[in-house]
Image (cartoon, grey):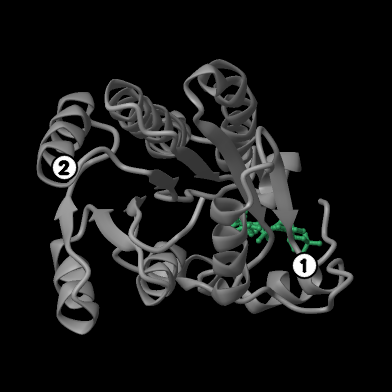
Amino acid sequence: MEIAGKNIVITGAGRGMGRQFAMDLKKLGAKPYALDVIQENLDALKNETGIPGKVVDVTNEDEVAAFFDSYTAENGAPDVLVNNAGITADSLFIKKKGDDIKKFSLSNWQKVIDVNLTGVFLCAREASAQMVKHGVKGLILNISSVSRHGNVGQTNYSATKAGVAAMTVTWAKELSRAGIRAVAIAPGFIRTEMTEKIDQKIIDKITVMIPSGRFGEMKEISRTVQFIIECDYVNGRTLDIDGGLRI
Ligand code: CAA
């Protein structure tokens, strides 16, 4: 698929990697549209780049469906959905503190499942419904993570990112009859606001496990997004772009 002129909806595009994807795709002539939950970030993106956006909570079924209806009525069906919105709420599964045993909280489990798994499910469902309805041979591009292989402190996040990879295969198999591809990227540790929160001691510990010897850059994942859009034979796979790290 050529990038120029394409309708590309990107979730979680108010900042971080999603913002980078949107800016880079716009430079290549695409028509990106940003979704996020923080209005100020969308305003800043619009002011700096002219990229339009809307506050949509990806966990809310009615909001997601209404957005894809109105977006399609205005612009035509999306050619590409980049399912990028994701959160972390890290903590050890079980931690012994003196005589106390601290357990991974159900609320931290649930909130990450809601955004990273249900959100991806809802956006992909609504975007692909519009593609099928309007005969658009599009692409569902999901952002998984190297944590899909399991990572210390990320029981919830790892489960969602493995789920995203599995849903990608399922959708590639099901949607191929409509000419729609489904592909995922599993970024490794990339320099973003999300990884900035990690303690330096742990960053050092992780870095020595990365054969490339460093965290990745957002641009490097953005290049992968562009490659996947352009190369029609990439389908049903999750590409680990992680400097060689497999946890
Ligand atoms: N890899 C390897 N070792 C890790 C680790 C990791 N990701 N996270 C924690 N550890 C180790 C710590 O170094 C520590 O080891 P020692 O006891 O030998 O010192 C041990 O696990 C316990 O950790 P803490 O002492 O930090 O325990 P805590 O209860 O205070 O905090 C935690 C637990 C919140 C999970 C904290 O360790 C943490 O934030 N870890 C980082 C988790 C992580 O990797 N998150 C990735 C965020 S970025 C992201 O998610 C994007 C993506 O797609 C990759």
Q: How much space separates mark 2 and mark 1, taking CA atoms?
A: 41 Å
Which x, y percent locates residue 28? 42, 72
Amino acid type assigned to the residue bearing label 1 in the image: Ile
For residue 104, which quarter of the picture? top right
Q: Can residue 152 be seen at all in this image of the molecule?
A: no
Residue shown at 60%/20% (left/top)? Answer: 170
Report whether 124 appears left or right of 201.
left
User: Which of the two labelled residues, at mark 2 and mark 1, occupies the earlier sequence position?
Assistant: 2
Which x, y percent locates residue 59? 29, 33
Front in this rendered view, residue 54 or 57: 54
The circle drawn on residue 206 is 1
Which x, y percent locates residue 225? 55, 58
Q: Can residue 90 be seen at all in this image of the molecule?
A: yes
Asked if 5 appears above or below 96 in the picture, the reply is below
Residue shown at 56%/42% (left/top)? Answer: 157
Residue picked out by circle 2: 71
For residue 21, which quarter of the picture? bottom left
Tell me if the residue at label 1 has its CB under 8 Å from ligand 1.
yes
Front in this rendered view, residue 82 or 235: 235
Report whether 121 appears left or right of 42.
right
